[in-house]
Image (cartoon, rainbow, N blue to C red):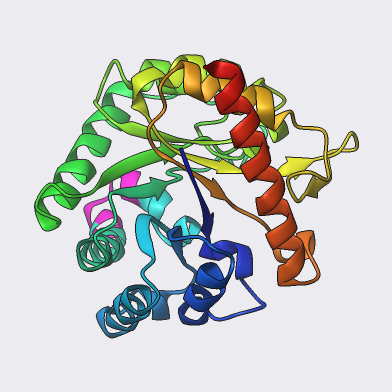
Amino acid sequence: MQLGISTASFFSKYTTEDTFQIISDLGLNVCELFLTTKYEYNPTFIDLIVEKSNLFNIDIYSLHALGTQFEPELFNKVKRTFDDALEYFKLIANAAKKTQAKYYTFHGPMKLKKKTYHLDYQYLGERITLLNNIIKDITLNKCEIAYENVHWTYFDNPNFYTTLRKNCNVSCCLDIKQAFQSKISVYDYIESMKDGLKNIHICDYNDDGELKLPGEGIFDFVSFFEFLYSIQYKGPIILELYAYNYSNINEIGKSLEYLKKCLEIAGKNYK
């Protein structure tokens, strides 16, 4: 297993294109590219990202967009609304092609109202299949959707993914902080994901639910990594932080050293 970091971890502190040198200085060579604005969906900007990633030898494993801008409307049944959202989706797909990203980390529709949601899984499955086919076609089968568990979206519980996969074949991304915020065990999510698990986002949290750098909270990373070894997880482990989780880059470096030690211990224990 390989440690990486999301460029989202530097949002508001550094521009996206300037994060690759930081990632390299941290001793990492894999990342998730988070495109934070419509400006960054532009093909010219993506060309700059490719140049920077190549310069610092950083593999862009996955790509993430600010999905609240358009992803919910990809499920809208009104053609004009869907078509507008699809234009943004295609820009992300073309960005995935240029960056050679393997997965598009996807949030999908949100739960905005305090009500019981009765989901049409057949329709969701058909629409996700359509979107997956579009991104696969644009990237020549090099990239596909990885649906991420997020506590304020449809995927706020393990049963959502279990039921969804009965209606379509879609991979997924596990986010441990989102599992915590959903008040559901991360292992329950993994049980539902099984072989669909292709990407993992990590950070830490304390007893009060405050998000922290790994090593500053209560999450048991050694046990978590041991479990990942046991299920033969092959993807990267992506550190995804918020700007308020740290004051300087050195703090991220110390956290990464802690995670490397946890991985080493887990590897020895598993063997």
Q: Position of residue 237 (x, y in %)?
A: 51, 42
* 139 sits left or right of 118 in the view: left
Instruction: In this rendered view, identify the residue nearer to me: 202 or 137.
Output: 202
Residue 216 against residue 155 in the figure, above or below: below
For this view, does 240 lie left or right of residue 99?
right
Position of residue 28 in the picture relative to residue 259 (left or right): left
Residue appearing at x 53%, y 26% in the figure: 117
Instruction: Give the dominant element type of the magenta stretch: helix, strand or loop.
Output: helix
Query: Percent position (x, y) of residue 154?
Result: 50, 33
- Where residue 265 appears, x then y in whole percent? 65, 29
Residue 5 figure quarter: bottom right
- Which residue sits at x=40%, y=48%? 105
| Residue at screen point 38% across, 16% down | 163
Residue 26's spot in the image, x, y percent?
59, 66
Q: What residue is at 14 percent from the left and 43 percent from the top?
A: 133
From the viewer's perspective, is residue 259 above or below residue 166? below
Q: Which residues are magenta?
A: 74-82
Q: Is 57 included in the stretch rendered in magenta?
A: no
Q: Which quadrant of the structure image shows residue 189?
A: top right
Residue 33 appears in the picture as rendered: yes
